[in-house]
Amino acid sequence: MSDNSLPGVLHKFGKNLHAFESGAVGSSKVLVFLGGLTDGLFACSFVPRLSRILEAKNYALIQPILRSSYNMFGTGTLDR
């Protein structure tokens, strides 16, 4: 497997919301990683490494995909 890929589970919750779980999938110990305002999955280059480190400590890594992910939501002005 590539250093930039992660095995995991894609969860659907709510009406159209999703989250990707990697690391120790199913663990009761979880770290939720939120990128920046318009970011989605793998918001930072260190996310795959972070997931592997957390897995060794029996933690899952959750990356929610928010409604604002990839949409530039909240980055405009009223003048636009």
Image (tube, grey):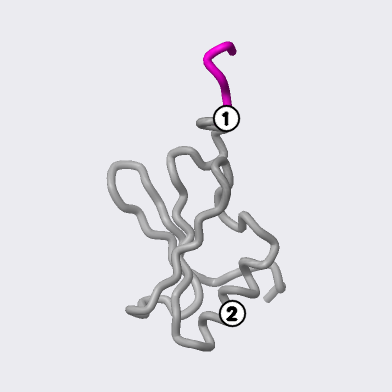
Q: Which residues are magenta?
A: 75-80
- The residue drawn where x is 51% and y is 31% is 74
Mark 2 or 1, nearer chain start? 2
69 relative to 20, above or below? above
Residue type beneath disc 1: Thr
- Element on which disc 2 rests: helix
Mark 2 closeness class: few <14, some 14–19, many ≥20 residues within 10 Å: some
Quarter that holds the N terminus: bottom right
Residue 62, located in which quarter of the rendered image?
A: bottom left
Foreground of the two, 22 or 47: 47
Residue that extends furthest to the top in the rendered view of this protein: 79
Residue 75, position as x, y percentages in the image: 57, 30
Q: Residue at x 59, y 13 (%)?
A: 80
Classified by dominant secondary structure, the portion drawn in magenta counts as loop
Decide if residue 6 is on the left or right side of residue 8.
right
* SS for dot 1: loop
Is residue 28 shown left or right of residue 20? left
Q: Give coordinates of residue 39: x percent, y percent.
A: 58, 46
Image quadrant of residue 60?
bottom left
Instruction: State whether residue 38 is above or below residue 8.
Output: above
**Residue at left offset 35%, top offset 42%:** 16
Extreme residue in the left direction: 14
Residue 63: % across, % down: 48, 59
Report the amino acid beneath label 2. Arg
Q: Residues within 10 Å of mark 1 (few under 14, many from 20)?
A: few
For disc 2, the marked residue is: 52
Of labels 2 and 1, the one closer to you = 1
Residue 61 numbered mark, or none: none
Number of callouts: 2
Say whether residue 76 is magenta.
Answer: yes
For label 1, the residue is 75
- Label 2 and label 1: CA atoms lie apart by 32 Å
